[in-house]
Structure formats: C-alpha cells, structure tokens
Image: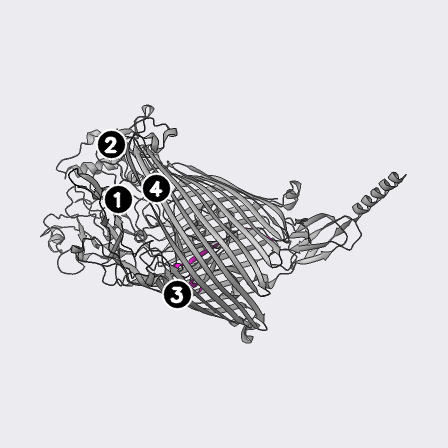
C-alpha cells in the first residue's frame, strides 16, 4: 500500500510540474513596428533560449511560472518579462526601444574602445556587413576604396599575391607599410587571416590617434577585431560557402603571326645579318598568353559555432579556401581554425583566450615581375610564329628560333616551386576590477610563422637555351616567433558633467627570426617521393642565419569630456628599441587632440535638420622603426668568394669583409602631423559627413649619403638626413533612407587627395628605383614627389632632313645617323645637346585623387549591392612597352604595325630600323601613360528566404547570392591592368612601373549563407 501511495504521489508531482511548464510565443518589433530578426531570447540565469526569425516571430517552450525572459538585440535596450500567467500558452509581443547610447557607434582605438561621438582623431571604419557576400580572399582586399585616405593596390593578381596599403599617401622612401594589430597583437601583415572571421576594421590615420603606438605608428595603424560570441546568446551555427570561376583580365594588344612576320621582313632590310624567316611560318600565330592561362576555379567554405551565457561567451570557427590561378602553375589554398572565448570567473575577474591558426600552401611556378625571364613577360615578348609542341605525344616542346626566351609552357611545366606556411596567432588575458572604476588587464600575445619552401628542377632539354642537364633541389625553412606582454590600467569616472578615462600601460616585445636553406644536385630517381636533400649526390650548399629585436614601451592616454560637449585627448608613449645604439634607443611620442560637439550647444541643439556636429583638431609625433634589425652595427660577410690559401700546405682559410659603413648615431624616422576635421550628421542620421585636412612632416629620414670612392664601398652609410612633406584632404559621405517597411537603400562616397614632396635629402644623391631593362624608371630628389618617373621628353617624329639639321644634337656629334621617322628628344636645358642633363620629371604614380562609391538596396527579401572604386590623375610607366617597341626579334605591340614610312607619316611610331643609334627605347615620356581608371569592383544580388520556409527546415536564416568581382574597368591605359602596385611588397620605389605583373582576374561566384 505504501509503494502504491508513493507511486501515486510521484505521478501527481510530475503532472503538476508538467502543468507548470508553458509555451511563450509572440513577435518582437521596433518602435516603428518593423520586425526584428535574430533577437536573442533567453530565460534569465539559464542557457535555455531561442531567437526570432526573419519576421520577428519566436516560440519558447518549457517556460516555468515565475521565469524571467530576457529580450536583447544590438542597438536596443534589453527588456525583461516575468511569467505570471497560469495559462499553458502565452502570447508576449515585445517592442524594443533603441538604445541611443548604444547607437553611438563604438569604435576600436589603440588599447581600448571609444564611443564614436567622443573620438577626437581621424579614425575610420569599414562596414564589414557590406562585404559579407563578396568573394574577398584577403582582409586587405576589403579595404580597397572603402576608406578615404587609404590607398590599397594589388602587387600581383596571383593566388595568395601581396597587397600594399598606404595610409594617407607616401611619406618616406623606406618601408611605408602600416602597423597591423589583430585582437591586440601587433603583426606585419593580415593576409593570413580568413576574411570571414573579421568583425570590424578600424584605421587610425592621424598622429593623435596612432601616437599610442609610438615608433610604429608613422604609416598609420590598422586594427582588426575578429568575431566572437555574445553574452546571453543562444548557440548558433553559421555556414557560409561559395564557389565560382575566374578569368584573366588581359588587354595586351600584341601582333599576330602575320604582323610579326611582316615587321621582321621590314627590319631585315636594315640588318647587317638578316634573320632566316624561312625557319618559321607566317601562318602560325600562337597566343602565348592564352596558352599559359585558363579558366580557374575558386571556392570557400566556413562554419562557426557561437553562443554565450551570462558568464561565458565562445566561438569556434573553421574555414577552407582554395583558389586556382588564371595562369597555369599557380594555385593557393588556406585552412583556418579559430577559438575565441571570454569567461567571467568572478564579478571582479574576467579571462579570455583567442587562438587563430592558419595553414597555407602556395604553388607558384612562374617567375613573376622579372623583366627579363619572368614567365608572363616571356609570354608577352615571345614571337608567335612557332607552336607550343613539336610532338606533344612525346612531350617535345618547340622553341624560339631567334631569341633566348624559353617556351613559357615548358618553363611552367619544369618549375616546381611551392611554399607552405603554418601560422599561429594567439592571445590570452586576465582582467581584474581592482576598484569600482579601476581595471587592470594583463595579456600575452604569441605570433609564430613557420615557412617551408622547396623547389625541384628536373632534367630537361627543350633546346640549347632552355635545358637543365642535372636535376636540383632547393629547400628553405624559416621560423619567426613574435611575443608581446602587455599590462594596462584603465580608470573611468563620471562626476556630474565631467567624464574622465585614463590609460596607463607598459609592454615588452621580442621577435626572433631563424632560417636555414640548402641545395643539392643529381637525385638518381626524380620521383616526387625522393624530393629531399639527402637523396641528391652532389653539390652540397647550405647556409642560414638568425636575427632578433626587442622593444620595451611605456604608454598613457587621458580622455576628458565636459558636459558631453568639450573633448580633450592626450597620449604619450616611450619606446626603447634594440634596433638602435644605446644612446638612441629611446624615443618619445606625444599627442593631443581637441573636440567640440557644437551641435550640443543651445544655439544649435534644437536645429531639426542637424543631428550632430563635432569639430576636431589634433597634433602628434609618431615614429618609423622599420629600418632593419642591425642598421647601426658594422656587418661582415664570409661567402665562399672570400676564401684564401695560406702556408706551405695551402690550407683554405675563410676570409671576411666589411660589407658597409654604418652610423652608430642613427635613430628612427619621426613624423609630426596636424589634423583638422569635422563629423556631421543630418536629417535624423540619414546623412553622415566626415571631412579631414592633414599635414605630415617627416624628418630624420634614413638615406644613404655619398662618400669618396677610396673608402672602398659602393654606397655610403645610412644616416638621418631626409625630410618629406605629405598633405591632403579626405571626404566621406553616407546616405541611408528607410522608405517603407519593405524598402530601404544606402549610398556611400569617399574621396581623398594628397601631395608629397621630398623637402631634403641632405648631401645625398638622388635616389633611383623601378629598375627595368633600360635603366631606372623612378627618381626621388629634393622638391619633387617621392618616386616620380624620370626620363627624356619627346616631341614626335622627324618628318624631314631639314628638321634634323635644325634640331639639338641628340645622336653622336652631328645627328648624322638620324633619318626622317626617328624620334625627337627635347633639349630641356637649351644647351644645344640632348644628354643626361636633359632627363627630367615625366610623370608620377601618385593620383590626383582616389575614390570609392557603394550602393545598397533592400526590398523585402532581396538585396542588391554594388561597389565602384577609382583612381584619377596617376600615371604608369609601361616598362613592358620598352620591350614590345624594341627593334629585335621578339614579339611586338600592335602599334608597330603602323610604324613611320615615307608613305605613312601620320603616326607616332618611329621608323623600323635594326640599327637604332637613336636609342629610341630609353626611358622617356612615350612610355608614360594615363593610369586613371574606374572599376566596377563588385556587384552582388542576394535573396533571403522567407521565415516560414526556414521554420520547415529548422533554420533561422538562409541567404542565396550571386556576385561578380572586377566586372568592368574603364581606362585609357594600354597595358593588361591599370591597378599597378609594386614589383614586391618591399620594393617601395617601383610604384606604378608595369613590369608585366600577374593581372587581376574577373570572378563570378554563387554562394549560400545559413544559420541554425
């Protein structure tokens, strides 16, 4: 009987408990009645919750009497509802109210965050939501055209190719790259990051905002924050994937087989030894660029799992990206994994960890940017009058009968170059609330990159000029480990109308780089399984080295505001760097900025059309220490060429030589910057406008000064003698308008212009760069812009002997070798002779202005986004044309079909002659072209599936989209692509010199985004 009674009581208790559980449903909207999707709905104090669908609807099961339900959404005030209704099914419709304080965008600044309304410096952000459906393969690519004053250009269109970023132009002949900081850890680049992992990007453009980074802030600071979970957010799974194709953008106008043959036939009439054209056919016309290019495939897949309780937030994410190059022999793949978590251990203690791992594999079997033997250059310059193959079934390639250029298809086939990288960037921290208004944070960052490069060249023979009689293998292993330990105190206090926040910190950083490489020859079996050094039998060669530097810093910042109107920010940083000698290791970098929220004054406060207006002015000093590891120390070299024989036995002793003179008193470059601007918002926030004017003076720039030849060095020591000035204007406009509940749109526009001048090079010689076949294309000298194009001016063609007789002497002693149809060079000095003194400025790679325009339209579930970027007024030195205009056996530009003849005088192309005593292809303005362009960078059309469809498959969101990248380009430039960067990321004075780099690709993808 007792057991039966107990069973009955348990059943009654279970029924009672079940009766107490309820189902709550309803709709969440804003104050205008618009549904809010993805609102976090949580039973307070538990992890039990849900989220609204696209229509703002939700259903929450298993709710007990007395439970408190919490509704939270970014930009809105969190609301709670207590369950006091005894019914089993309860309807709760909730209206969320906009949080005006939250809507004052919070931006990331150095070592913290600030409300945008309180920012006094020039800080700009990228709206990463606009990029969510674009096929961006690097984070730097996301900056292109998006921010006024930030110029981003591709150095290569190759998979995994480098991108250069210039913040407010160029102010130095040395390293002008900005500092990157990822989740608080400084790094030299961000191309390794998965763009899908990025939550926000801020750029600190002026000295008052970047001075907190001291000796590394001279070229701007890019702050990257990765995605994470949110407190009190139900768990979510996000899947984002796309796939598509890429096509080469190629605008080169090259001669076909018949045109090349006819040009060579005409040149033969001027040759001492005519070439034997019977070796080739006029009817054969091989398009070598087409032979080495392809339609390439690209794909990207990402998945993340995130969520949070009132104590723990987390995100785990992974991604796989694979990209084929539009040039055969090139491809890239990247695998990423990431963990980000924060945990409230106690009310006064919070800890966190952020781990980002990336593994990449780059295959690049072309020699890119090499003006002589680069694969793309070869494909452009090689004559078209022979086929790829003699006998493809036997693997026998054909070859040039007149030049030393290799068959580019064979060149790619026989090159096996690959680079594998494993990178880990991690950060752990603990934050203590010491007092109510005082917090202490200690963090440790670790950034390690391991690189494994290998190259194998098999035995092959195409012809005598393209062969390798002994196979060889090369291996390189490098490791770079960067560590940083940061400790900061943050104090915030509000007293009446006074608001104060203060930061004090100290940091220690260390970086060590080690590498070793080896090469050997003659692997008996060329099977890929034996591509390692020990398998080879001859030609041992090994070398390696190591270097390191350290940095110790003290930093501080104070922000003060009165009555939410008057703002002051002051910062100071002291850096001690091992890059400099003991007497110059410490540098000090102060800044101050003022702000006035004039719209809060009574005489403007009630102005209906003005939402906000803030005036800003700032000054600061920042530094540039990117000058090498041991610039003040004399270094020696002990290569094999310095070995000597001593003694009767003629023993071999290693010799060493001093490689360069050094100045022990060098220090970092210093930039002093002034910024004046304003931020304004109109018509209830529909129109936002930001304007900035800046002036940057660089002093103590490191330059090499001349020394007498009897010192025995090619170059003199590098000393702090250079000065430069850089100034400009930036403007950003953004308009957004919600026409109805179903339709809204936004338009954004930014434009920036800048001018730089080298104001002093001390006693040094002008600096040259941009090397190509016939010399240097760029020059830097006092009074001119950095890296301008330098050469001769031309004045058309001679049309008669009388013109030649009345022209300055430009050939020999009397112009006797000149004929009608030859090119005129201008006597700039007016001394009657055209010589080196007549070389002058013939152009500049710096644009008059750069700009970007974005458009977004949303109608019901449809989204349309378009983005246009452009550059105006910049010029390009088309070094490839210096090859294609040569009077030799290589392929020609189609312009040469219209070369001058006595019956064709209305042309700009000189007469054809193999005896070019006029040196027609010297650096001159005939190779400088207008590089301005307008590019439809991206167009994306997306559709969000209706919520009632999503409910059937238990999903909260699904978006389908199609996207096109680099769809249209409008330009007058005759080369492959007007977006010309640098030959390499470190060749800073080769900007705008087209050496036949890997062109950009036109990309089409289809994608899918899902959320569970």
Cα distance in 3D space between marks 4 and 1 = 49 Å
Picture disc at residue 588: 3
Position of residue 969 in the picture relative to residue 539 (left or right)? right
- SS label for mark 1: helix
Against 626, is 135 above or below?
above
The location of residue 36, given as percent across then percent down, is 63, 53
Give the mark, 3 or 4, whose residue is nearer the N terminus.
4
Against 75, is 401 above or below?
above
Which residue does the numbered mark 2 point to in the structure image? Answer: 282
Picture disc at residue 895: 1
- SS label for mark 3: strand
- SS label for mark 2: loop
Which quadrant of the rendered structure holds the N terminus? top right
Q: Residues within 10 Å of mark 2 (few under 14, many from 20)?
A: some
Give the mark, 2 or 1, whose residue is nearer the N terminus.
2
Give the mark, 2 or 4, whose residue is nearer the N terminus.
2
* Contact check, label 3 and label 4, Cβ < 8 Å: no
Q: Residues within 10 Å of mark 3 (few under 14, many from 20)?
A: some
Picture disc at residue 516: 4
* Contact check, label 4 and label 1, Cβ < 8 Å: no
Cα distance in 3D space between marks 1 and 3 = 57 Å
Position of residue 635 in the picture relative to residue 325 (left or right)? left
Cα distance in 3D space between marks 2 and 1 = 19 Å
Asked where in the image residue 525 lies, by quadrant, the reply is: top left
- SS label for mark 4: strand
Q: Is residue 286 visible?
A: no
């Amino acid at each position: 009987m007792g057991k039966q009674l107990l069973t009955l009581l348990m059943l009654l208790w279970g029924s009672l408990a079940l009766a107490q559980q309820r189902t709550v449903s309803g709709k969440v909207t804003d104050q205008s009645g618009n549904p809010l999707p993805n609102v976090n709905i949580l039973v307070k104090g538990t992890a039990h919750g849900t989220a609204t669908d696209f229509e703002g609807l939700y259903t929450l099961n298993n709710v007990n009497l007395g439970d408190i339900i919490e509704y939270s959404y970014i930009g809105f005030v969190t609301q709670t509802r207590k369950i006091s209704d005894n019914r089993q099914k309860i309807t709760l419709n909730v209206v969320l109210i906009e949080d005006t304080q939250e809507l004052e965008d919070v931006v990331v600044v150095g070592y913290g965050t600030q409300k945008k309304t309180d920012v006094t410096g020039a800080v700009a952000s990228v709206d990463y939501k606009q990029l969510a459906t674009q096929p961006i393969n690097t984070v730097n690519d996301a900056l292109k055209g998006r921010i006024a004053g930030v110029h981003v250009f591709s150095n290569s269109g190759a998979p995994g190719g480098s991108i250069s970023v210039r913040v407010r132009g160029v102010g130095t002949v040395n390293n002008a790259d900005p500092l990157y900081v990822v989740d608080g850890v400084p790094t030299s680049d961000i191309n390794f990051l998965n763009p899908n992992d990025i939550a926000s990007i801020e750029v600190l453009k002026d000295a008052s905002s970047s001075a907190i980074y001291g000796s590394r802030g001279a070229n701007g600071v890019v702050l990257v924050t990765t995605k994470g979970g949110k407190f009190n957010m139900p768990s979510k799974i996000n899947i984002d994937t796309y796939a598509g194709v890429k096509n080469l953008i190629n605008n080169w106008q090259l001669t076909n087989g018949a045109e090349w043959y006819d040009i060579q036939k005409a040149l033969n009439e001027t040759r001492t030894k005519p070439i034997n054209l019977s070796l080739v056919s006029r009817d054969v016309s091989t398009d070598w660029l087409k032979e080495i290019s392809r339609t390439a495939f690209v794909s990207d897949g990402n998945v993340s799992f995130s969520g949070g309780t009132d104590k723990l937030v987390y995100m785990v994410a992974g991604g796989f990206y694979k990209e084929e190059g539009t040039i055969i022999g090139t491809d890239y793949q990247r695998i990423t994994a990431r963990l980000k978590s924060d945990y409230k251990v106690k009310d006064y203690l919070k800890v966190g960890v952020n781990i980002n791992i990336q593994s990449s594999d780059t295959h690049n079997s072309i020699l890119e940017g090499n003006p002589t033997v680069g694969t793309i250059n070869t494909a452009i310059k090689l004559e078209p009058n022979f086929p790829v193959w003699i006998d493809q079934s036997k693997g026998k390639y054909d070859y040039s009968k007149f030049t030393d250029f290799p068959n580019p298809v064979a060149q790619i086939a026989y090159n096996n170059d690959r680079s594998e990288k494993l990178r880990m960037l991690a950060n752990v921290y603990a934050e203590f609330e010491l007092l109510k208004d005082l917090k202490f944070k200690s963090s440790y960052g670790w950034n390690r990159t391991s690189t494994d490069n290998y190259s194998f060249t098999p035995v092959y023979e195409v012809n005598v000029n393209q062969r390798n009689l002994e196979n060889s293998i090369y291996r390189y292993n490098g490791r770079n480990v960067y560590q940083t330990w940061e400790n900061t105190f943050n104090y915030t206090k509000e007293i009446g109308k006074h608001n104060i926040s203060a930061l004090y910190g100290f940091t220690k950083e260390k970086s060590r780089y080690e590498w070793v490489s080896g090469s050997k020859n003659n692997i008996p079996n060329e099977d890929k399984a034996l591509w390692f050094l020990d398998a080879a039998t001859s030609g041992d060669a090994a070398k390696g080295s190591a270097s390191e530097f350290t940095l110790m810093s003290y930093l501080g910042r104070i922000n003060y505001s009165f009555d939410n109107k008057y703002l002051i920010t002051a910062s100071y940083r002291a850096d001690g760097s091992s890059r400099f000698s003991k007497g110059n290791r410490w540098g000090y970098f102060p800044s101050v900025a003022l702000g006035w929220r004039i719209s809060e004054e009574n005489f403007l406060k009630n102005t209906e059309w003005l939402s906000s207006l803030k005036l800003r002015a700032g000054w600061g000093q920042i530094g540039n220490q990117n000058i090498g590891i041991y610039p003040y120390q004399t270094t020696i070299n002990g290569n094999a060429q310095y070995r000597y024989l001593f003694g009767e036995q003629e023993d071999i002793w290693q010799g060493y030589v001093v490689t360069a003179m050094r100045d022990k008193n060098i220090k970092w470059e210093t930039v002093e910057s002034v910024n004046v601007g304003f931020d304004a918002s109109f018509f209830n926030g529909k129109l936002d406008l930001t304007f900035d004017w800046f002036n940057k003076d660089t002093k103590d720039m490191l330059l090499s000064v001349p020394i007498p030849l009897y010192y025995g060095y090619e170059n003199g020591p590098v000393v702090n003698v250079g000065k430069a000035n850089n100034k400009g204007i930036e403007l950003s406009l953004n308009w957004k308008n919600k026409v109805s509940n179903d339709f809204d749109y936004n338009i954004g526009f930014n434009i920036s212009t800048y001018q730089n001048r080298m104001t002093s090079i001390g006693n040094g010689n002008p600096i040259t760069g941009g090397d190509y076949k016939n010399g240097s294309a760029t020059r830097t000298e006092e009074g001119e812009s950095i890296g301008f194009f330098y050469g001769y001016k031309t004045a058309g063609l001679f049309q008669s002997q009388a013109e030649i007789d009345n022209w300055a002497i430009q050939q020999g002693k009397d112009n006797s070798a000149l004929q009608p149809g030859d090119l005129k060079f201008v006597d700039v000095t007016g001394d009657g002779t055209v010589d080196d003194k007549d070389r002058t400025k013939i152009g500049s790679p710096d644009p008059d202005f750069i700009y970007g325009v974005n458009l977004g339209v949303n109608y019901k579930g449809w989204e349309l986004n378009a983005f246009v970027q452009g550059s105006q007024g910049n010029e390009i030195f088309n070094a490839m044309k210096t090859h294609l205009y040569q009077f030799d056996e290589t392929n020609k530009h189609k312009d040469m079909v219209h070369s001058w003849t006595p019956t064709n005088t209305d042309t700009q192309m000189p007469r054809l002659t193999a005896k070019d005593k006029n040196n027609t292809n010297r650096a001159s303005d005939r190779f400088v072209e207008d590089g301005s362009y307008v590019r439809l960078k991206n167009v994306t059309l997306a559709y969000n599936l209706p919520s009632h469809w999503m409910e059937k498959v238990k999903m909260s969101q699904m978006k389908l989209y199609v996207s096109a990248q680099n769809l249209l380009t409008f330009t007058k430039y005759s080369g492959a692509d007007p977006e010309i960067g640098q030959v390499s990321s470190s060749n800073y004075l080769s900007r705008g010199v087209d050496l036949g780099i890997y062109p950009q690709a036109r990309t089409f993808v289809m994608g899918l985004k899902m959320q569970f």
